[in-house]
Image: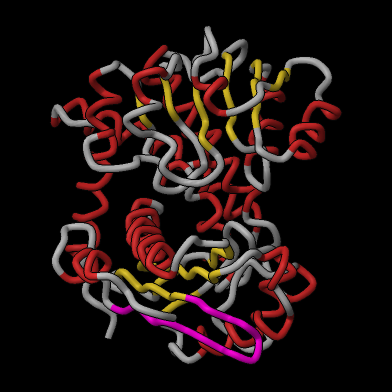
Amino acid sequence: MTDVSDGVLHTLFRSDQGGHEQVVLCQDRASGLKAVIAIHSTALGPALGGTRFYPYASEEEAVADALNLARGMSYKNAMAGLDHGGGKAVIIGDPERIKTEELLLAYGRFVASLGGRYVTACDVGTYVADMDVVARECRWTTGRSPENGGAGDSSVLTSYGVYQGMRAAAQHLWGDPSLRDRKVGVAGVGKVGHHLVEHLRAEGAEVVITDVREDAVRRILDRHPEGVSAVADTETLIRTEGLDIYAPCALGGALNDDTVPVLTAKVVCGAANNQLAHPGVEKDLADRGILYAPDYVVNAGGVIQVADELHGFDFDRCKAKASKIFDTTLAIFARAKEDGIPPAAAADRIAEQRMAEARPLR
């Protein structure tokens, strides 16, 4: 790792977005590993969060992303009712070019060196097979294959939780949780998005999709020749007439000063982390009458799944917990209405209260 700018240090030590307990910069020259592990909080228990493998433009950008994602995991785990704090790791580089067994093993050794303060899992650019490799060096690894004692693909319950969040939004806004005949736009049909489409089509929703990868779009269209259509890009999707729900399921920052004014959907509920590009976007959504289901609440199904792996994985138990995302989301909407604030602010208040009432991990 090279220099970290004052901007990152300001975020870490002096801003409301900071407050992280620990940030570890990792480098293994032999394998080419450069990684950042950020622990935001262990108030509720060991920090839990995935490993993102991404070709960041700079080390500064990677550190900033790790800080933001780790903070988001604290809130996500708190709202999911888990006894875990928030952490996140990022590996810098294109996984298609530099991901090797040696690099993943080196990364596992760095995670293991934290002695259980951080528990890792999959995220963008990492998969179950990768966690199997990491686990060879680190016992605090989840998201492993069933053959290696793990829970397998966490995107299954991530998508299910988002689906429950959509049903809660429909109940709150339209008085009926059914998504039948609703028009839903899904941006990103990769690991989570393609499972989400399955839930939507099973209930009879009309789905419009887009993805930067043509093969991902083709897979969905081939499976669903009816009821699913595709558009060229996200810019086209968010302007689609008659859209009821918009589901950002790719990278963060999807809701910003350019996209919010042109959204046609009445609900935003998706799987992507950190959808709000900056503070204030949640108010812009509310001012336009768009109901926002906080991302870290509705996409918590995956972390519920991997957390359960630490105690002996049971899929039915996890699915039952993920089903409660429906009730949690409804409670957030009710709290937002009661307090006269956007749902994102209501969710933050509830999560912060749980963290504040917990004793720090000793």
The answer to which quarter of the image holds residue 124 is: bottom right
In the picture provided, is 357 more to the left or to the right than 44?
A: left
Q: Position of residue 322 (x, y in %)?
A: 52, 46
Q: Main secondary structure of the magenta part?
A: strand
Apparent side of residue 77 relative to residue 9 in the rendered image (left or right): right
The reply to whether residue 83 is visible in this rendering is no
Q: Which residues are magenta?
A: 22-35
Q: Position of residue 200 (x, y in %)?
A: 65, 26
The spot of residue 197 in percent (x, y) is 67, 31
Residue 23 is a magenta residue = yes
Front in this rendered view, residue 192 or 173: 192
Magenta stretch: residue 207 in it? no
Q: Quadrant of residue 289?
A: top left
x and y percentages locating residue 324 in the rendered image: 46, 42
> Taking 188 as reference, is 103 above or below it?
below
Q: Residue at x 52, y 65 (%)?
A: 50
Q: Looking at the figure, which quarter contains the C terminus?
A: bottom left
Residue 250 position by quadrant: top right
The residue lying furthest to the top in this view is: 242
**Which residue does the image show at 83% across and 19% down from the upper left?**
225
From what the image shows, is residue 91 above or below residue 68?
Answer: below
Q: Which quadrant is the N terminus positioned in?
A: bottom left
Q: Nearer the viewer, residue 6 or 114?
A: 6
Camera-nearest residue between 150 and 49: 49
Residue 226 in view in this figure? yes
Residue for point 22% across, 33% down = 335
